Image (cartoon, rainbow, N blue to C red):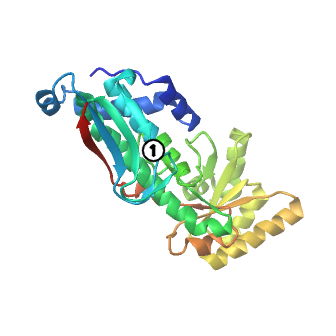
Amino acid sequence: MRTHKISSATAAALASAGLQVKDVQRVIKEALREDLGAGPDVTTQSTVPKDQRSKAVFASRSAGCIAGIDIAVAVLELVCGPKNVLVDKKASDADRVEPGRVLMHVTAPTRGLLTAERTALNLLGHLSGIASATRQWADVIAASGAQVRDTRKTTPGLRALEKYAVRCGGGVNHRMSLSDAALVKDNHIVAAGGVAQAFAAVRAAAPKIAVEIEVDTLEQLHVALGAGADLVLLDNMPPAVLRDAVLIAEAHRATTGKSVILEASGGLTLDNAADVAATGVRYISVGALTHSSSVLDIGLDMQAVV
């Protein structure tokens, strides 16, 4: 399977979005290999004249929030060659769209366009689905000042792209990998012999990174604050208990001068998100952003042969 390079303009657009160009290309090439690893696109090769070029339009068929337009362009360029692809973008990532909204017009070799179509739409639809779901959560909690945050519950190999989609939807990212920051969860606490012991062990091993501790009770919260946690994940606590947790953290700051960021997790739905966010926590953690979002329906329609 032979692919081309992407244009410098597309590479710059991906980099400005906080994406590593090599990571995006790796994902696309692996996706293309699923279609082309055993040979060419038989249907397209046999039905489309070799030198034919066509105009096509990418358009949203559902309401939502867009993420991945330049990734879709990168797919087309890798398949067709950047000099053979003309793109007129009509929307940008993070835009809210309604059904029928044109995202971009494309002119390209027909064979390449049809070969790249499914990979481009798979990535664009998947990432836009994540952005759309995140936008719903961000809108629901906007009045509180809290932010919705993702988790590592991502599709293997797609973490960087999926976390980018969360940002497009108005969310913020948790750690990208296990080495970026420490998150001491209940199993770590059991293994270490307690909250304080687990925190001390992580701090001794990695003194410069932020340490977040997951707690299930207000008693554990007191211990985590006393140990020196930077962030505390409040797991499966109802709003009344979360409000008490915020008061405890505020009292801790008044006494010690140390601010601690609180994050709520577990049992969250769009119906209760506003109540949870209004308790005063900084973040609400929603794994469903990346592991359960529905694809946004986006289509590619050929308009004319040129």
Mark 1 surroundings within 10 Å by alpha-carbon count, few (fewer than 14), some (14 through 19), many (20 or more)? few
Query: Where the C terminus falls, by quadrant?
Result: top left
Q: Position of residue 177 (x, y in %)?
A: 55, 41
- Residue at left 35%, top 44%? 58
Q: Residue furthest bottom?
A: 240
Q: Is residue 110 visible?
A: yes
- Residue at left 50%, top 46%? 93
Q: Position of residue 239 (x, y in %)?
A: 62, 76
Mark 1: amino acid: Lys
Query: Where the N terminus falls, by quadrant?
Result: top left
Q: Position of residue 224 (x, y in %)?
A: 72, 60
* Relative vertical location of residue 306 with respect to residue 165 in this rendering, above or below: above
Q: Is residue 255 left or right of residue 39?
A: right
Q: Secondary structure at mark 1?
A: loop
Q: Is residue 194 left or right of residue 292?
A: right
Work out whether residue 90 or residue 199 is closer to the camera in this orientation and state it.
Answer: 90
- Residue at left 56%, top 42%? 178
Q: Is residue 237 visible?
A: no
Work out whether residue 139 or residue 30 is closer to the camera in this orientation and state it.
Answer: 139
Work out whether residue 191 or residue 6 is closer to the camera in this orientation and state it.
Answer: 6
- Residue at left 14%, top 30%? 42
Q: Position of residue 50 (x, y in %)?
A: 18, 22
Work out whether residue 226 or residue 53 is closer to the camera in this orientation and state it.
Answer: 53
Q: How many marks?
A: 1
The residue indicated by pointer 1 is 90
* Relative vertical location of residue 95 with respect to residue 56 in this rendering, above or below: below
